[in-house]
């Protein structure tokens, strides 16, 4: 299948690209690559690339593809909160425009990277895909709005699918440290503390980035009738944890560390547990391989191999919001988060 993968140089995209290639798909990337200086370990797969901001893509860029997998956007709550109007412009409007262009260009499938953050503040009950949306951040709201708008485009020629990923973790060439399991393991490795900034009670589903890649691959290859205009919670129902449980797993794997709470630690309004039985029933080739403990072990080994320091993971290189602010400060990125001409050179 000829696939256009937006955000192929990001945290998930850097893992998904080789998955698709190994399955024999013809993959073209679409990415402005503002995180080109943020590679942690390993190389990114070399594929044909449209190096554009997602807001600047045209219909001609879409022609000839069998499917579009749309990952690109502001990737987390801190970035989403930074300038909410840009979150709306990039994550919502540009995503809906991309889907409309894809439909006009005759692309039959559109896989959208939604998120379980659409459930937001939902308590401790298990939620399936029919649960009401209740986002508590601009990032979560943008995902809800895209789902609602793109769903209305579905017809006999255009088939959207919405993959609501649990909170990601695990090793990627474009590693993120702002994800809870990656972050807690890094704190433990570099400081001896598993540092919780909440009171540890909120629930969160988590899923390894490789399992997310496997879910996209399964949806891409599934019969249209199984995925047409449907949403899927991505993960395993057994992989829902309270934050303190994740902290305890980290402390049991990383030597000589203990769980610590920030002085102002309090409840987090983001609290939800998800039921992932729908994807298990309908996409039989999707079989998650990872657990939280295996993920911590993988990250701990990687941090040991790289000699990760506190400055590394708390610094501007690997923290998405800090890196974006740095690029604006040094004139590599505009206030609208578009790349400026100077971005053509590597950023130290």
Image: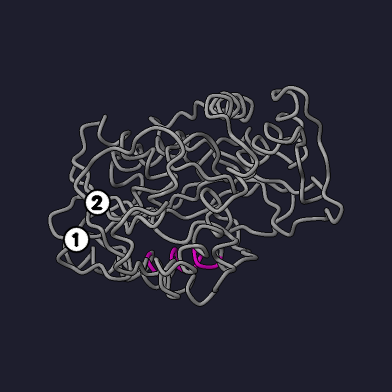
Q: Position of residue 28 (x, y in %)?
A: 22, 48
Q: Position of residue 261 (x, y in %)?
A: 83, 45
Instruction: List the residue tagged with mark 2.
Output: 4
* Few, some or many residues within 10 Å of mark 2 (<14, 14–19, 20+): many
Query: Quadrant of residue 290 in the image?
Result: top right
Given residues 44 and 147, the one toward you in this image is: 44
Q: Contact (CB < 8 A) between labels 1 and 2? A: yes
Which stretch is magenta? 141-150
Q: Position of residue 322 (x, y in %)?
A: 56, 59
Location of the N terminus (image quadrant): top left
Residue at 35% in and 42% down: 219
Q: Position of residue 181 (x, y in %)?
A: 63, 39
Q: Is residue 338 magenta?
A: no
Q: Is residue 143 magenta?
A: yes
Q: Is residue 150 above or below residue 291?
A: below
Instruction: List the residue tagged with mark 1.
Output: 62
Left or right: where 43 falls relative to 180: left
Left or right: where 200 falls relative to 140: right
Query: Quadrant of residue 285 in the image?
Result: top left
Q: Main secondary structure of the magenta part?
A: helix
The answer to whether residue 345 is seen in the rendering is yes
In primary-sequence order, the first of circles 1 and 2 is: 2
Given residues 304 and 125, the one toward you in this image is: 304
Marks 1 and 2 sit apart, C-alpha to C-alpha, by 8 Å
Residue at 66% in and 45% down: 204
């Amino acid at each position: 299948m000829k696939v256009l993968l937006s955000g192929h140089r990001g945290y998930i995209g850097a893992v998904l690209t080789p998955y698709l290639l190994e399955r024999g798909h013809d993959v073209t990337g679409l990415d402005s690559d503002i995180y080109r200086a943020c590679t942690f370990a390993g190389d990114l797969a070399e594929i044909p690339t449209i190096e554009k901001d997602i807001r600047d893509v045209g219909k001609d860029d879409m022609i000839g593809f069998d499917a579009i997998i749309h990952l690109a956007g502001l990737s987390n709550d801190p970035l989403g909160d930074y300038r909410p109007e840009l979150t709306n412009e990039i994550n919502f409007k540009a995503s809906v425009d991309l889907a409309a262009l894809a439909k006009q260009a005759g692309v039959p499938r559109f896989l959208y990277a939604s998120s379980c953050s659409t459930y937001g503040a939902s308590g401790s009950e298990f939620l399936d895909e029919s649960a009401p949306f209740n986002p508590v951040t601009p990032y979560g709201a943008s995902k809800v709005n895209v789902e609602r708008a793109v769903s209305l485009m579905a017809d006999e020629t255009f088939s959207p699918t919405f993959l609501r990923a649990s909170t990601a973790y695990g090793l990627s060439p474009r590693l993120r440290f702002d994800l809870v399991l990656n972050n807690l393991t890094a704190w433990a490795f570099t400081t001896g503390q598993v540092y919780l900034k909440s009171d540890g009670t909120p629930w969160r589903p988590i899923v390894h980035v490789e399992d997310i890649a496997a879910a996209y691959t399964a949806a891409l290859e599934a019969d249209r009738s199984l995925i047409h205009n449907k949403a899927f919670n991505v993960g395993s129902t057994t992989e829902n944890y309270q934050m303190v449980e994740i902290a305890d797993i980290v402390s049991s794997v990383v030597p000589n560390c203990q769980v610590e709470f920030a002085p102002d630690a309090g409840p987090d309004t983001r609290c939800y547990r998800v039921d992932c039985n729908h994807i298990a029933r309908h996409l039989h080739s999707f079989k998650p391989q990872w657990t939280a403990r295996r993920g911590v072990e993988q990250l701990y080994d990687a941090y040991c191999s790289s000699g990760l320091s506190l400055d590394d993971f708390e610094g501007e290189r690997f923290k998405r919001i800090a890196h974006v602010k740095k690029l604006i400060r040094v004139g590599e990125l505009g206030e609208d988060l578009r790349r400026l001409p100077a971005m053509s050179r590597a950023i130290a």
